Image (cartoon, grey):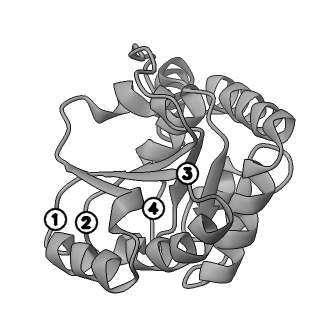
């Protein structure tokens, strides 16, 4: 029985410009250092883009130092803990979760509910949610080159972003709704 997601409100987008984002605890397992390495190359081709990282954790200082060493601090925003962070998802053009390990992350369900195209690592339960080319893009963990090529592909193709985001939202509503989880759980106990 898969996790189920309850609907939630999305805040209106406040900022313009192309924004890639993630919501994650800042732990090594989330692979945000890999995303930062890909980002360094991405902004050489898309210098106006912004990367927004919402979340806190013991890796914060390390990640901020790495961003400084990579020379990307002007294009990366570490927002820290954001209350009801999922309501801000509409502010992203692409959502990225480059984890080294996962179970079945709610944040991917939330990004899908928001209609975002998602790039995520092919680990844990993520492939149960995303199928590359159908409703998102899966990449190998520890692979900044794959993240980079996926970011470039989606950044260059607004129609593809919209198609993947719409398809993922449909996947979430059909297979990962709170109603379906409740129904399947009750059925299992019968």
Asked whether 86 or 14 is in front, the reply is 14
Could you tell me which residue is drawn at 72 percent across and 25 percent down? 170
Pointer 3 or 1: first along the chain:
3
Could you tell me which residue is drawn at 77 percent across and 31 percent down? 162
Q: CA distance from mark 3 to mark 4?
A: 34 Å
Image mark for residue 15: none
Q: CA distance from mark 3 to mark 2?
A: 25 Å
Pointer 1 or 2: first along the chain:
2
Which SS class for mark 3?
loop
Asked whether 157 or 171 is in front, the reply is 157
Asked whether, in this view, residue 15 is left or right of residue 94, the answer is: left
Say whether residue 122 is visible: no
Which residue corresponds to mark 3? 48
Which residue corresponds to mark 4? 103
Q: CA distance from mark 1 to mark 2?
A: 4 Å
Which SS class for mark 4?
loop
Q: Nearer the viewer, mark 3 or mark 4?
A: 3
Pointer 2 or 4: first along the chain:
2
Proximity of marks 3 and 4: CB atoms separated by less than 8 Å: no
Asked whether, in this view, residue 4 is left or right of residue 136, the answer is: left
Pointer 3 or 2: first along the chain:
2
Q: CA distance from mark 3 to mark 1?
A: 27 Å
Proximity of marks 1 and 2: CB atoms separated by less than 8 Å: yes
Which residue corresponds to mark 1? 57
Which SS class for mark 1?
loop
Q: Nearer the viewer, mark 2 or mark 4?
A: 2
Q: CA distance from mark 4 to mark 1?
A: 19 Å
């Amino acid at each position: 029985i898969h996790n189920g997601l309850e609907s939630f409100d999305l805040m209106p987008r406040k900022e313009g410009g192309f924004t890639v984002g993630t919501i994650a605890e800042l732990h090594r397992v989330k692979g945000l250092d890999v995303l930062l390495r890909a980002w360094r190359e991405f902004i050489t081709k898309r210098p106006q883009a912004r990367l927004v990282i919402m979340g806190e954790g013991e890796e914060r200082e390390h990640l901020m130092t790495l961003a400084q060493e990579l020379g990307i601090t002007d294009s990366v925003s570490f927002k820290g803990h954001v209350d009801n962070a999922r309501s801000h998802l509409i502010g992203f053009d692409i959502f990225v979760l480059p984890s080294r390990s996962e179970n079945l992350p709610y944040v991917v369900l939330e990004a899908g509910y928001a209609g975002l195209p998602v790039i995520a690592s092919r680990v844990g339960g993520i492939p149960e949610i995303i199928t590359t080319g159908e409703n998102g893009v899966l990449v190998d963990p520890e692979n900044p080159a794959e993240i980079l090529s996926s970011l470039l592909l989606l950044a260059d193709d607004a129609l593809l972003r919209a198609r993947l985001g719409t398809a993922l939202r449909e996947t979430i509503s059909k297979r990962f709704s709170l109603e379906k989880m409740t129904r399947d759980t009750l059925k299992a106990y019968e």
